[in-house]
Amino acid sequence: MSDHNTIEREEIFSKVMRAGRRTYFFDVRETKAGDYYLTITESKKFTNDDGSFHYKKHKIFLYKEDFGEFRDTLEEMINYVLDAKGEEVISERHQKDYKKNGQMDPQENGQTDSSSFTDIEFDDI
């Protein structure tokens, strides 16, 4: 059997985007008829209790006839989020000094908390 008949079609063009524990793969593939389509795969790393890890993957298949509507909808959703919340990332994971409403840093008022620590993944080193 030739490689052309495999279930997972050969990549024609690929890009990878890393985002924390998630990785996004954008792959242009070829249909049996010789046309191109796009797959977008999200891969997220999970760590087991024993220290081993596994990945969960989710894949979207996007065909040319849907590109325009997909692009328009994605752009509309992105613009909505940016218009409503701006481009600043407001999450504890991305901003170490982020404080929830009224929450004070214990060190600002002379208190220390020995149970607090910084969560660092080996991929961050």
Image (cartoon, rainbow, N blue to C red):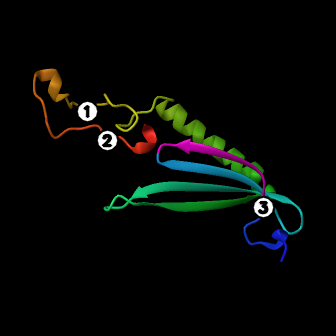
**Left or right side of 16 for 28:** right
Q: Residue furthest left?
A: 111
| SS category of the residue bearing label 2 | loop
**Marks 2,3: beta carbons within 8 A:** no
Instruction: Using the image as rendered, state which of residue 32 and residue 12 is in the foreground.
Output: 12
**Left or right side of 100 for 89:** right
Instruction: Using the image as rendered, state which of residue 39 and residue 9 is in the foreground.
Output: 9
Q: Amino acid at mark 2?
A: Asp
Residue topped by disc 2: 119
| SS category of the residue bearing label 3 | loop
Residue topped by disc 3: 10
Position above or below: 37 against 82: below
- The residue at 83%/77% (across/down) is 1
- The residue at 20%/28% (across/down) is 105
Give the label, 2 or 1, closer to the camera: 2
In the image, the segment drawn in magenta is: 10-20
Magenta run includes residue 62: no
Instruction: Using the image as rendered, state which of residue 102 and residue 89 is in the foreground.
Output: 89
Q: Amino acid at mark 3?
A: Glu
Q: Residue furthest right?
A: 34
Mark 2–mark 1 distance (CA, rounded to whole Å): 22 Å
- The residue at 51%/29% (across/down) is 87
- From the image, give the main secondary structure of the stretch colored magenta: strand
Q: Amino acid at mark 1?
A: Asn
Residue topped by disc 1: 101
Check disc 1: other Cα within 10 Å, few if <14, some if 14-19, many if 20+.
Answer: few
User: Quarter-wise, where is residue 120 in the image?
Assistant: top left
User: Quarter-wise, where is residue 96 in the image?
Assistant: top left
**Left or right side of 16 for 97:** left
